[in-house]
Amino acid sequence: MLRVQIASTMAMTETTCKDPVIHNHWHAIAAIEDTGSHVHHTRLLGEDLTYQASTARDTSDSTGDHEFAVSRTAAPDKLLPVHCAYGYIWTCLGTPAQPLFTLPEYAESDRNNVCACSVGVRVSAPRAVENFLDMGHFPYVHTGILGEQPHTEVREYDVEITEDSNEVIATRCRFYQPQAAAGANEGMLVEYVYRVPHPYCSILYKSCPDDESRMDVIALFVQPVDEINIRAHALVSVIDATSAPLAIRMFQQTIFGQDKPILENQLPKKLPLDPRAETPIRADKSAVFYRRWLSRQGISYGVIPAAA
Amino acid sequence: MDTKPDSSSDNNHYWHPIASSTDLTPRHVFHGQLLGRELAVWRADDGNVNVWENRCLHRGVRLSIGVNDGRELVCQYHGWRYANRTAGCTYIPAHPADSPARTICNNRYPVTEQYGLIWSAESALPATHNSASVPDIDPGFLNGSITAPVADGDLNTATIRALNTEREIDAGRLLVLRPIPVNATIDIVSTVLQSYGYIHPLSNTPVHCAVEARDTYRHTTQVTPLTANDCIASNANPPAELIQLHFIIQPVDSARSVIRGFMSGSSTIEHPTTWLQLHNAALSQLRIVAEQQMQAIIPPAAWEVSITPVSESLAKMPGISNAAATTQRVVVRAITDTAKDIKSVEMAAITGDLATWQPGSHIDVLLANGLTRQYSLTNGPGQTDHYNIGVKLEAESSGGSSFIHHSLKPGDVLTVSPPRNNFSLRRDAVKTLLIAGGIGITPLLSMAKALFHSDLPFELHYFVADNSHVAFKSCLDEFGKAANIVTGLDPTETNSRLQQLLAHYENAHHVYLCGPGPMLDSAKAIAEAHSWPDESVHFEYFKNATEVSQDKPFSVALARTGITLQVPAGETLLSVLRNNAVALPSSCEQGACGTCIVDVIDGTPLHQDVYLSNAEKKRGNCMMTCVSRALSDSLTLDI
């Protein structure tokens, strides 16, 4: 009977991406440090890919973009575009329409950059991004870490879409956190800034306990395995000389592990863009902007477009 | 059957079983599915069974992974609370100061509990449907062998049915079979059921049953009792009755079904465990046959289910929505004396369910003598089948309280407004202080019940003249040490007690005050003196005791309507607006309830209400049209 169910699931899921915006975007597929010279397999936008560290490295290329070979499994001789950035290998199934967004903090020499995890989740990419933008769930899903009852209020914050870079930016986001920093004894309001520079990627800036003038960075790069399956890749970039990469990984994996069962229980799995499909509240301002922003770009992959 | 069976006909109130009664264990949420649609099925502590769309309205998270706290269902993702019975949202933790819009209400499906099974139907209930008044399942189904008596006009028939089913099961007259899930279409399952038979446990020989199909879903046959004692007819004993065996196929999805069944009809069914085992074995065999037959066909696509869009107003990020548009009719169920001169009045819906309320809500009661009065609800969480109010006989009653005390009787019909909430309870306080004076206990009682049920820290201080004035004593007793009754203090002593209670403000502490005007005024002053911030001090006046001046005339420009009106001395702004066909909702019309609020664009209002906080009054960008006027010669309003 398993055969029957798989067959019917397959029939419902489109195998390839017909969304030109998503098709021509860069997508992260794996952490550089996890990729060796043997053949690795993954899926992107419903297609099987193979990738490996190139055996013949072109050492004259200072960008390092050609250190990895990525191709469709079905067409191993035709290499796909590759870009190495922010600790991950990025590729594009079509023709990259625009350069990958910038994350200048990654290059700052005193930062501890950690590829914290790559977690498979049975949900669409936009649902995962929306969860990343959401503060209201902290006391319920990340209890005792990112939030704690009874401190559940989401205070007013600002959201805008930047003219120049076409990103969703949420600022002045404040939330009560029980243990904002290692060694903190009591809770405090922590301030966040969120960026959504890519339909399937989001970056969180959080006040840094060690240096008031700078922000810690946590980035989510979602790999759309298909419309309703993802791998969520996390980059943590902190100014923290003391925390070992292992501790950072454990922390981030705990957070993603807590989100996973919630995301996998969202119905429908694709993000509905019709404003009447779900009930937003003021706390969901960033999600409301994000959904409109996806609609305006004509995104159709991983979403249920609003009826025209 | 590739097409969904019920969607093409108007027969979408066909009852299907979705769970066994025993699946709904206390504080559990059962994940059901019917005709492709997922359902969250849960029983509240009062026995009521809720069948809801398995989706939180907010972000679509399954409610079957939520928490059944006995009164409300709490979503795992953001802690939204949905009330037993009405499925209305009662609390949104991200905005603790706001009451959720009344229109945030989950999709509900019809439910009845009979024969040890929970039954539901395909089409969602309209918001006004009375969940208790569902029609009976096909009465001919059991040839009249078991019928659950339904008390006429009883408002909790679902519970009664549940109890009767339990009684039948306890008495051994009803045996609910274990459900068998089958990955096959209803048609295939229905066909294989025709060949139902089992191995007789005593003779070890196959017994074939003549199965009669009433329709695709319902099948009946008869079996003989198992033991000699049951079936040997002698001259002394009449022949034992045959046992009726009923199968019902639950259409889960296009290629998934559950065979449910029960046995009934004999005066007692002996050896229930043996019966359960042999049917289990026989049905498991049928499952293998049915699933083999499925291999031969192309599996049908899963049935599509539509998700009902939320109302347009909700899609636009609602703020606080309290406008009362409709009224509801209720019948007085009970009137009891709860203290000297205080009656407790319980009202139930006549048709449909009552609109959802939250702690702090009040209703307008339209009395038969033409008066309208506001009363706070005293209900606890999940008590959604009635409204309860406390009414004090006022010495100078102009007819409201005296009508309720002297003329109202059980069975009388009243018209009430849906609940409005100007006194929302935040549940994000580290500690909540509730301070009541006299009849001001009523909204605070509802708050205390909610806090108590959710284990949130609170103290209730109830100031009364003497013990004979203590209302709702038995409720207060439940709170144990959290409730403190203070008797016999004069105004000076009351003040010094309030000084003690409000001496220390700490972060995220909140105080709620309700009582006579002078007590509230001094409590507010004391709180301010002890550095309680405005947003931590919540109060509700019974009435506006401010001397309202109507001396000075002024003009008012309506920015949206584009007209200018004169408000003469002696007439209110609200009545001038009304006379000029500018419709504005209002309720108390004495500056206490906040219903008739409008935004002020230009000019300086003369605030004469008790609804707005001092900070809001200072800002001067909104006003109550029923009592407030203008300090400037003219005002410009955003209407």
Image (spheres, coloured by chain):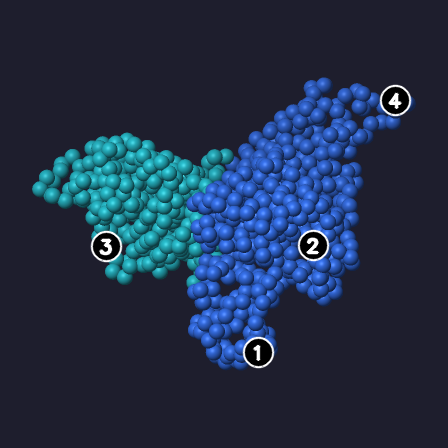
Chain colours: A cyan, B blue
**Residue B604 in sight here:** yes
Task: Tell me the SS state at disc 4.
Answer: loop
Label for residue A98? 3
Label 1 is placed on what type of residue?
Ala
Q: Position of residue B547 (x, y in %)?
A: 58, 67
Label number found at residue B392:
2
Q: Secondary structure at mark 2?
A: strand
Is any part of residue B114 visible from this angle? Answer: no
Badge 2 crowding class, 10 Å Cα cut-off, few under 14, some 14 to 19, many 20 or more, is many
Q: Are marks 1 and 2 in contact (CB under 8 Å)?
A: no
Front-most of B37 and B351? B351
* Mark sitting earlier along the chain (1/4): 4
Residue toward you, B116 or B83: B83
Both marks 1 and 2 on one chain: yes
| Marks 3, 4: nearer the viewer | 3
Q: Earlier in the sequence, mark 1 or mark 2?
A: 2
Which residue in the structure is indicated by mark 1? B569
